[in-house]
Amino acid sequence: PIPVLTVPTAPYEDQRPTGGGGLRRPTALFESQRNYLPNFVQSLLSSVDLRDRQGCTMVVGSDGRYFSKTAIEIVVQMAAAN
């Protein structure tokens, strides 16, 4: 089993997606700001009703650039924890 951690955090003011492009920010921002990516991922997961998340399939895509593997691992772990 994957250990579940509860991490206290606060939102970042600039985490508002623009159009269909998701959260488009420099990679350095995702790496330097504590919990920047997990905050955004959790906000997306929380926006879907729990009953709709049960047994659903989530697809995570990537273009393979730098930080993609790390980001995908975080998204998948958080989705599993949810």
Image: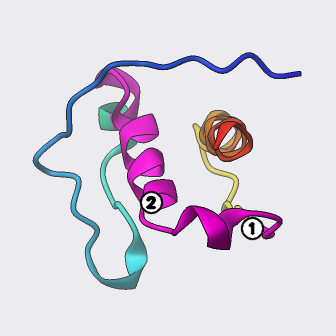
Residue 39 pos. (x, y %): 37, 39
Residue 60 pos. (x, y %): 70, 61
The three-letter amino acid code for the residue at tag 1 is Val
Residue 8 pos. (x, y %): 33, 19
Q: Earlier in the sequence, mark 1 or mark 2?
A: 2
Residue 81 falls inside the magenta stretch: no
Write the residue at 59% across / 40% down: 71
Outermost right residue: 1
Q: CA distance from mark 1 to mark 2?
A: 13 Å
Residue 59 pos. (x, y %): 75, 67
> Is the stretch drawn in magenta largely helix, strand or loop?
helix
Mark 2, residue position: 44
Write the residue at 40% across / 83% down: 20
**Front in this rendered view, residue 51 or 64:** 51
Write the residue at 80% across / 69% down: 57
Mark 1, residue position: 59
Write the residue at 47% across / 49% down: 41
The N terminus is located in which quarter? top right
Neighbourhood count class around disc 1 (C-alpha, 10 Å): few under 14, some 14–19, many 20 upward: few
Q: Is residue 17 above or below residue 38?
A: below
Camera sees residue 68 = yes
Element assignment for label 1: loop
Q: Is residue 62 above or below residue 6?
A: below
Neighbourhood count class around disc 2 (C-alpha, 10 Å): few under 14, some 14–19, many 20 upward: few
As drawn, the label of residue 80 is none
Outermost left residue: 13
Which range of residues does the magenta coloring cover?
A: 30-58
Quadrant of res 24: bottom left
The three-letter amino acid code for the residue at tag 2 is Leu
